[in-house]
Amino acid sequence: MGIQKPSLIGEFSFKPLAPYNLNLTVKAYNFSWFFQNENPIIYLNIEDANLLCLTHEDKKGIVYSKVYLVEDKNVNITPQTIKEKIRFILGLDEDLSNFYQTIRKDPLLHRVPKVLVGMRLRTTSLWNALLIGVCQQNASFLQGWKMVLNLHRLFGRKIKFFGKEIFLPPNPKTIVKYADRLGEARLGYRSETLKRIAEAFSRKDLFEKEIIKLDDEEAVDRLCLIRGVGEYTAKLALVFSQRRYSLLPLDRWLMRLASEAYKIKNPNMKKVEKFLLERWGEWCGLAVFFTTIVLDAEPISLALERLRKNELSPKFESEKPTPLTMYKLLY
DNA sequence: TGCCAGGCGGGGT
DNA sequence: ACCCCGCATGGC
């Protein structure tokens, strides 16, 4: 994992659809090395090339991005491709007015349009989203993200970028190569699943560009063919990578929260799923994302306590890592 | 110590 | 369609 010297290949400016909050969008579920001083670094992967974008926002809300290519080889990527990718990752054109309308009086999410106004979900690749999903299986928020962190540190390529060390997200080929060392990331039985996903991507059995073409149900079914990937992981990955907000990644945590918040009698997964699909509609995936944010991804008993006390704003400073503070507390 | 946690698959009924 | 169990690991 040699040290690379990234080179500047382009500069772009964007006018996001207002209201937009770059700061919150980038901080959520991120790692410390993706910040250069206060400025976020966005990671892009285009045609197997690694790019890092040093990004900032001016007082008028214009977003600027300096794009650096990590590889020293020549790659053929058009500025247009880079620009579109950044727009998509940061959700710069996403119109949330209908979402805000939907959750205006929601017992879980009503604070979002006020305290998190302008925040978008920041996407990652399908591969990395699956990796995150697998790490969340049957584990707490903290345990899961420690696994992701371990994987990045152990198997991600280390880059020196403006004097700071950055770990790129590990790629499938590296995970296949070091498959017998996955235990070091403390994944437990999840190692086997991650290995199978990495193999599928390496063989090009699984390819993000193919999955994009499928409709929601086909895409979920396709991902569920991998042993160890079930509906939750598949849907979460499609929400995080492709903004398929119609999908509802329902886990036991949300199942218990929702049954309490909406007073669903004799709750079970099917019943709660049906309820939330109707309630949140085309915004399910985004609603799930924001539910974890506003409750700081607290373990279920504490999250239920917060719900009862109507404490539905995230902590912007905290001692324990939360989705919004893990970037400075988890390393 | 012995549970249990933001799943899953495989076995039962 | 359900229900139930075991599964690595870490945290309490």
Image (spheres, coloured by chain):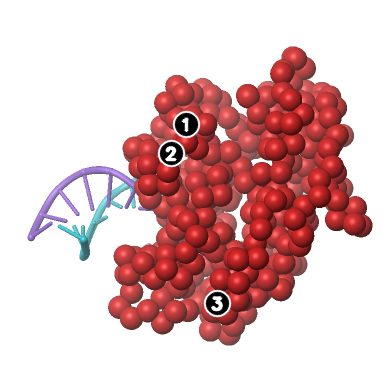
Chain colours: A red, B purple, C cyan
> Depth check: A89 or A83 in front?
A83
Reading the image, the residue beneath label 3 is A106
From the viewer's side, name the closer residue of A223 and A316. A223
Q: Which structural element holds mark 3?
A: loop
Residue sitting at 52 percent across and 31 percent down? A209
Q: Which residue is nearer to you in this view: A113 or A15?
A: A15
Which of the two discs, 2 and 3, labels the residue nearer the N terminus?
3
For the residue carrying disc 3, how many other residues have a C-alpha within 10 Å: few (<14), some (14-19), or many (20+)? Answer: some
In space, the residues marked 1 and 3 are separated at their CA atoms by 36 Å
Figure label count: 3
Would you say the residues marked 2 and 1 are in contact, meaning their CB atoms lie under 8 Å apart?
A: yes
Quarter of the rendering occupied by the N terminus of chain A: top right
Horizontal arrangement in the rendering, residue A308 relative to residue A12 (left or right)? left
For label 1, the residue is A210
Residue A214's tag is 2
Q: Are marks 2 and 3 in contact (CB under 8 Å)?
A: no
